[in-house]
Image (cartoon, rainbow, N blue to C red):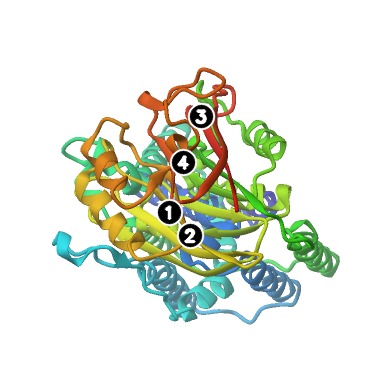
Amino acid sequence: MALPFLWAKGRDLDDPLSPGQAPGWGKTISLSLGITAVIILLYFVFTAPHVLARWTGVDYLLILPIFMLALTGFAWLMSWRWPHLSSTVLLFLNLLFILALTLTAGFHQFNFPPNSAAYPLLAPVSTRLYSLILTLLLSPILLLDFMLLASDLVALKPSPRALGLGFGFSSLLLLLAIFSQIFTTVYAYIPVVGPYFRNEFWAVYLAVGVVLFLALLSLKELSAHLPTWPVALSTSIFLIGLGAVAGGFLVSARPVPPAHTHQRITILTYNIQQGYNLDGQKNFDGQLALIRRLAPDLIGLQESDGARIAGGNSDIVRYFANGLNLYSYYGPRTVTGTFGIALLSRYPIHHPHTYFLYSKDEQVAVIHAQIEVGNHTFNVFVTHLGNSGALVQQQEFLQLVRRKSDVIAMGDFNFFPDTEQYRLTTTVLDDSWTLRWPNWVNDRGQNPDHEIDHIFVSPGTKVLDVRYIDNPHASDHPALIATVGW
């Protein structure tokens, strides 16, 4: 970002405004909004390639090389003397980019049926990846837009008052974009306004793209005086890109299944509150240290949707998987507006699927996958029900579980043991806690009567141990760990 700024600052200013000619405030505001729209798109999407990976479910290690190839190609083009591009061509490229970005979000969303009878709903697998590839290849157009908009703003020589007004409106645009993106997940908690943002993830990016396009229309000479970058700079960008791709592969998890068949498996369910502790402080490392100390074989994570602007674009699931060297599956794509659930495993994850449950409030999902340990094939489920663990959601969850053998069902169920939801669940599955501690109190004096995080298993399962790890310095939920043997 600094290079376009420096270039814009030093651009041809030999034709200053004639005396008495004052730049219009409208032009200053338009240019300021356009610059901010570029920053928003870079900030929300392209500063961390794993954001698009979580949008689409495409492997980060496939997205990163394409993204770096696009940046390198742009740098090489800038190092040659570009032909004079017409305004029409540049506007068309921007329009194509905005459309591709919007479709990349939209293709990976789908309309949730209003009728509860349509659930549990299997999440469709999108094969329309051409919009993602086009988005990545065209993304460097944002850098060109920034240079053109910034250089025109410098050449305009607006007054401090006009500049302050322009970037005042720009700050409002940034604020609206941030809140709008957040509202696509937390709409259920925002009275009056919130419901309008349900399943409208794509619209946030379309709106910002429209602002950018309108700002480009206000430019007098859209493609005039395109700069030539030094070849050394282009080569440096290529080498940096190559290093980034290599680094992505080097730090990625390379799990190896245990060589020996064990007669037990340790299960952990953990609501990590997007990687924050009870005091609202970011605590990725503290949570990772806690999980590493417990050394579980299977991990169900809830509230793990960190690869969005609200979570600083931090992919906590990938961070944990790399740090623990585990297989991982992130369930619902971030464009669907859930709080995020994921499954990590020491053993390969087979046939993973995501299902959605009926909800009038926050969207709820379930992961189902199979894990083979020796001659056992476990059907593993991870979920995070809505507030109060709506009965209809648990009924739909149990539809997925019924007639499955060797079930491990874990998550933040949002219901206590004295509820109808719990009673209904224990007609199909057993609570791992009561299998080990029939009197409800374990050898540490823990009693789960006010807990909402549970691990349910198939009847007849041998539970060797189960306990809560209450550490407010790690998360606002305790971790629940159970050991199952056979």
Residue sitting farthest toward the top: 445
Residue 370 higher or lower than 193, as above or below: below
Q: Where residue 274 sits: x, y (%)?
A: 50, 39
- Residue at mark 1: 458
Q: Where residue 294 sits: x, y (%)?
A: 67, 37
**Mark 1 or mark 4: whose residue is earlier in sequence:** 4
- Asked whether the beta carbons under mark 2 and mark 1 sit within 8 Å of each other, the answer is yes
Q: Where residue 405 sits: x, y (%)?
A: 44, 63
- Residue at mark 2: 406
As measured in the structure, the alpha-carbon distance from the residue carrying label 2 to the one carrying label 1 is: 6 Å
- Residue at mark 3: 478
Name the residue at 54% across, 54% down: 343
What amino acid type is highlighted by mark number 2?
Asp
What amino acid type is highlighted by mark number 4?
Ser
Q: On the rendered structure, is 477 left or right of 112?
A: right
> Which of the two residues, 94 or 368, is positioned nearer the viewer here?
368
> Which of the two residues, 213 or 323, is positioned nearer the viewer here?
323
As measured in the structure, the alpha-carbon distance from the residue carrying label 2 to the one carrying label 4 is: 13 Å
Q: Nearer the viewer, mark 4 or mark 3?
A: 4
What amino acid type is highlighted by mark number 3?
Pro
**Mark 3 or mark 2: whose residue is earlier in sequence:** 2
Residue 297 higher or lower than 222, as above or below: above
**Mark 4 or mark 3: whose residue is earlier in sequence:** 4
Whether residue 147 is visible = no
Q: Nearer the viewer, mark 3 or mark 2?
A: 2
- Asked whether the beta carbons under mark 2 and mark 4 sit within 8 Å of each other, the answer is no
- Residue at mark 4: 432
